Image (tube, grey):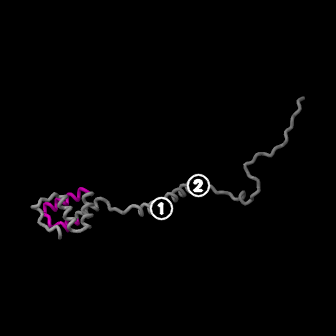
């Protein structure tokens, strides 16, 4: 008859830690439901978006949309460029309504004073000397 070899009894392996710190072992973490998890992610994204938007708005100057800038340039030209013939006023208006860069340039020159604005208009419309019946210094 074969003899059975006995092995010393071992402690069963356990995933629990020893009870050194009863406080940590007694605290249970609650698991989030799917809805709570999604809400948590949504809150984090919303908070990030707010911070990002605030940062970007401080860094980037506020520029109006192109159609608004073109319209503002046309409105100003309508008031300031009455020294032009009606045909040339319409030509300038068409140019400003179609080209945002020209509209922005016109507004920039207009902010620097009459002689520079008028000079820009003369160059842009390629006016002949015959058409120049205004005083550049006015």
Label disc, if present, on residue 90 of the rendered structure: none
**Compared with residue 17, is residue 90 higher up or lower down, i.e. above or below?**
below
The picture places residue 103, in percent across and down from the top left corner, at 25, 60
Query: Which residue is the extreme one toward the top?
Result: 1
**Residue 28 located left or right of residue 57:** right
Residue extending furthest bottom?
138
* SS type, badge 2: loop
- Check disc 2 and report the residue beneath it: 33
- Give the extent of the magenta segment: 75-99
Relative height, residue 78 to residue 45 (above, below) = below
**Which residue corresponds to the image point at 29% horizontal and 59% vertical from the top-left?**
66
The C terminus sits in image quarter: bottom left
Front one among 6 and 66: 66
Q: Residues within 10 Å of mark 1 (few under 14, many from 20)?
A: few
Q: Main secondary structure of the magenta part?
A: helix
Res 37 → quadrant: bottom right
Q: Position of residue 100 (x, y in %)?
A: 27, 57
The quadrant in which residue 96 appears is: bottom left
The label nearer to you, 1 versus 2, is 1
């Amino acid at each position: 008859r074969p003899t059975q070899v006995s092995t010393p009894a071992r402690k069963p392996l356990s995933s629990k830690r020893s009870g050194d710190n009863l406080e940590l072992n007694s605290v249970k973490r609650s698991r989030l439901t799917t809805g709570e998890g999604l809400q948590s992610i949504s809150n984090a994204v919303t908070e990030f978006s707010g911070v990002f938007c605030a940062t970007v708005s401080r860094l980037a100057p506020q520029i109006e949309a192109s159609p608004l800038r073109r319209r503002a340039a046309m409105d100003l030209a309508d008031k300031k460029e009455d020294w032009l013939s009606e045909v040339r006023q319409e030509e300038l208006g068409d140019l400003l309504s179609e080209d945002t860069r020209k509209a922005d340039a016109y507004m920039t020159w207009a902010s620097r004073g009459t002689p520079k604005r008028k000079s820009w208009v003369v160059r842009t419309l390629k006016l002949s000397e015959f058409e120049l019946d205004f005083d550049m210094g006015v």
